[in-house]
Amino acid sequence: MTLGRILRIIGAVAILIGGIVHLDLYFNSQYRFAGDMPNFGRSILLNVIGSAIIAAAVAARKEWFIRLAGIGMALGTIALFLFVHTNHTFLGFAVSGAVFEPSPQAQLAIIIEIVAIIALAATFVPSIDSADVSLPTPMAGASAAVAAVAVIAFAVHWNPDDTKTVAPATSTSASTATTTAPASSSPSGATTVPAASTPAVSTPASSTPASTPAAAAASAVSIKDFAFDGKSVTVAKGSTVTWTNNDGVKHSVVADDKSFRSESLTQGQTFQFTFPTAGTFTYICGIHPYMKGTIVVSP
């Protein structure tokens, strides 16, 4: 095996791993709910598919334009990463104050893309380039199959954990979620809820006797300085939690189990959700996924 082919395979594997890291961000870090949904999530999937295709082509073929496409893919991924992690917005998504978040995916993505760039750039050395040869057609097809199987396998592995949460989310007919604008504007609903579900929350007087001034204060979460204040809030079952965006940039509230999700909130806008069942509910900001919070609902 020639040095050129070894370097191409290293570059191809690095590009493929970079795509799989983005697949992990899409499923496990809730990036499919980030920014302007669903366009930002689609851009993540496009990166995954593009990485698999280019990785297979780079591993199989030695043509200069294919290797250059691999370098361009890695450079483009790094450039976009740096762009959104320096408080610039892409498809409604931006990160401020945390360059290498989420961890360790951010660090791994940068390192692996740099490895791809170095390995593929080295193949342009004349002595290495002239000695390199493309794979025969059957082996080229095998490299494409390996890339496709790797992406599909990870998608199938991660996706069931996500779909298992759909049933609990749709069965909470007593829950309500609303997004309200500042006092000068009219309220708008963040999610559609059957009209019959609203009385189910408001009628049981016995579900709220435990609420006290302290509990009422705890049910309000302020979004400020790119953080949820407080990060962990404990409320009684049946309580309504209100999030208020006090930052000058947009934020959103997205439950990890998809049981509630707000629209993008501008400064002064609020989002409310009523918790009809006990449990622990973790959530993130869909625009800045490193912002995390937890609601603990007691029986």
Image (spheres, rainbow, N blue to C red):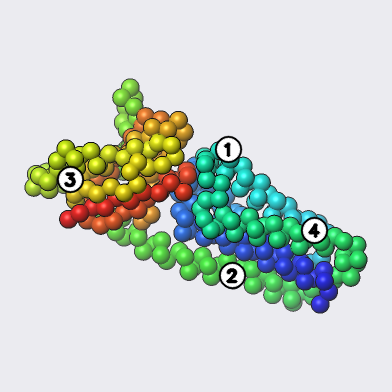
Percent position (x, y) of residue 5? 79, 71
If you read the primary sequence from the N terminus, does the residue marked by circle 4 or circle 3 appear first? 4
Residue at image position (74%, 76%) is: 139
Q: What label sits on residue 150 in the rendered view?
A: 2
If you read the primary sequence from the N terminus, does the residue marked by circle 2 or circle 3 appear first? 2
Q: What label sits on residue 121 in the rendered view?
A: 4
The type of residue carrying mark 2 is Ala
Q: Is label 4 in contact with label 2 (beta carbons under 8 Å)?
A: no
The type of residue carrying mark 1 is His
| Secondary structure of residue under mark 2 | helix
Q: Is label 4 in contact with label 1 (beta carbons under 8 Å)?
A: no
The type of residue carrying mark 4 is Ala
Visible residue check, residue 220: yes
Visible residue check, residue 277: no
The quarter of the rendered structure image containing the C terminus is bottom left
Q: Nearer the viewer, mark 4 or mark 3?
A: 4
**Whole-number angstrom distance, CA of label 4 to CA of label 1:** 29 Å
The residue carrying mark 3 is: 201
Position of residue 71 in the picture relative to residue 25 (left or right): right
Choose between 171 and 239: the one closer to the eye: 239
| Secondary structure of residue under mark 1 | loop
Q: Which of marks 1 and 3 is in front?
A: 1
If you read the primary sequence from the N terminus, does the residue marked by circle 4 or circle 2 appear first? 4
Position of residue 106 in the picture relative to residue 60 (left or right): left
Position of residue 236 in the picture relative to residue 258 (left or right): left
| Secondary structure of residue under mark 3 | helix
Choose between 35 and 87: the one closer to the eye: 87
Q: Is label 1 in contact with label 3 (beta carbons under 8 Å)?
A: no
If you read the primary sequence from the N terminus, does the residue marked by circle 2 or circle 1 appear first? 1
